[in-house]
Image (tube, helix red, strand yellow):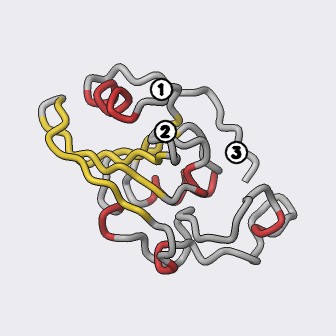
Amino acid sequence: MKVIVAVNEKDQIAAHAGQCERFFVYNVDKKEIVGQQEVSLAGNKSAGCGCHGQSHGQGHQHDQHHHRRQEPHICGGGTPMVEELSDCQALLCRSAGAGFIRKHQLRGCQVLLVKERDPQKAVLAWANGEILVQEESPCSGH
């Protein structure tokens, strides 16, 4: 099974998956991690969602809310994600917008907003059915 974890520059689980440029992709078999790779989206324009400047719900434009930079993110709009981030069973992050979650769920990927900050611990907890999830995302307004 493939599990993706959005990570920040400190290799901890990222706070906002839609802005994330780095992901750890774990292969899990029989409740153990059997492989891991890092995927970087920095500078990969094809990985973005293509929604910059378009309506992003709640009466605001996507480029008007709290994104700090103009690099692409993967909220799951019209353009395809990079191959390494597709076909996963779960994507673990600390927060994500409703659009990001919905679009990944439509692809069959369960998005879990986790409390754990250590990627490997979170993946093993997920594999063993012991993952602790947050009740609500700080990004639930978009």
Q: Secondary structure at mark 2?
A: loop
- In the image, is 139 to the left or to the right of 42? right
Q: Name the residue at 53% across, 64% down.
A: 74
Q: Neighbour class for label 3 at 10 Å: few (<14), some, many (≥20)?
A: some
Question: Residue 22 appears at what percent x and percent y?
Answer: 45, 56
Q: Quadrant of the C terminus?
A: bottom right
Q: Amino acid at mark 1?
A: Glu
Quadrant of residue 30 in the image?
Answer: top left
Q: Considering depth in this image, is 46 or 98 the residue closer to the camera?
A: 46
CA–CA distance between discs 3 and 1? 17 Å
- In the image, is 18 to the left or to the right of 108? right
CA–CA distance between discs 2 and 3? 15 Å
Q: Secondary structure at mark 3?
A: loop
Q: Name the disc covering residue 13, or none.
A: 2
Is the residue 22 above or below the residue 12 in the image?
below
Question: Residue 41 appears at what percent x and percent y?
Answer: 46, 67
The residue that disc 3 covers is: 139
Q: Contact, CB < 8 Å: mark 2 with mark 3?
A: no
CA–CA distance between discs 2 and 1? 7 Å
